Image (cartoon, helix red, strand yellow):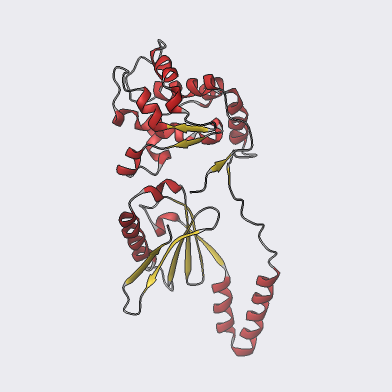
Amino acid sequence: MTGVVFDQQPITKEQLLNALVLAFRHSPMQVPAHNGTLFTALAAGFGAIQPQPGTVSLKGVCTALQGVPGYRFDAVIPALCRIKTWEPYLRMQVEVPPEFVVQRIVDFGARAVDCRVPDGELARAVPSAGVALSITSSGKLRPVVSRAPEPPPKPRRTGLKLAVAAVIILGLAGGTAGGLWAYKNLRVLVLETTQVSDEIPLLAAQRQGPTVTATLKDRAWLLLPRTERHDALERTWVRTSGLPGVRELRLVDDAGEVLGHARADPAGKPLVTLNQ
């Protein structure tokens, strides 16, 4: 699995603990977050919370909270998901617990709605996050993480321009309608992700000719059992194949790696392949 790579140094231990306490303070979990008990419990279990530099284990967080009065795993899910969405601000890779896979928790933003933390409070707990938050609010730049390895730079689109020109010329020679149809099928059309799937978390979806390419939002989905992912991709294909002229569906990650694809066999039945 491709890891998350951050260009800057991770935050300090104290800042991380303050951020964790902040998330639980705004969650449905009723724990003594204000009197230092929660901070003490998390500090005592810090070895499990950060098993290696640059990584936060949410499983370790749950282990550290086992002895805290009021702890229940279902009650801390919103806080855990909120912490997962803070990866760019914590500058660390946040590993989800196995329970997330069992419960099919893959859309962390949606599950974190019950743990709303004001940006100002996060900026006070993690001062370096304040810069990223202010930049995000201004709309000038969003804090993003890069993934390794970086995809190679896209080639110049001279070839595509020549292909378009060739199609137009052929259209003029063989009929205007045919040329316009071929030109239309070379265009990349952006689709709403809900047109493709409402169960696979997608970052984006687009169509070029008969092929729909869907980009996976979070690779945590790949932790689901293979049979469940196969069935989900098959249902996604059934939905996508309802779009006129679509003959193939590709599921890729944000680096363009093909994770799976689907099409219809000669008998019209779904033919699904998973590469991972």
In the rendered image of this protein, does residue 173 appear above or below residue 71?
below
Image side of residue 140 versus residue 72, left or right: right
Residue at the location (61% across, 39% down)? 139
- In this view, the residue farthest toward the bottom is 174
Residue at the location (53% across, 52% down)? 254
In the rendered image of this protein, does residue 141 appear above or below residue 233?
above
Whole-percent x, y for residue 235 in the image: 32, 61
> In the picture, residue 63 is in which quadrant?
top left
- In this view, the residue farthest toward the top is 35
Whole-percent x, y for residue 226 in the image: 34, 55
Q: Nearer the viewer, residue 260 or 205?
A: 260
> In the picture, residue 57 is in which quadrant?
top left
In the rendered image of this protein, does residue 110 appear above or below residue 227?
above
Q: Tell me the quarter of the image containing the C terminus.
A: bottom left
Residue at the location (61% across, 51% down)? 150
Residue at the location (32% across, 76% down)? 268
Q: Nearer the viewer, residue 260 or 232?
A: 260
Report the number of discs. Answer: 0
Q: Nearer the viewer, residue 17 or 133?
A: 17
In the rendered image of this protein, does residue 208 appear above or below residue 191?
below
Whole-percent x, y for residue 259 in the image: 45, 58
Whole-percent x, y for residue 154 in the image: 66, 60
Image side of residue 102 versus residue 5, left or right: left
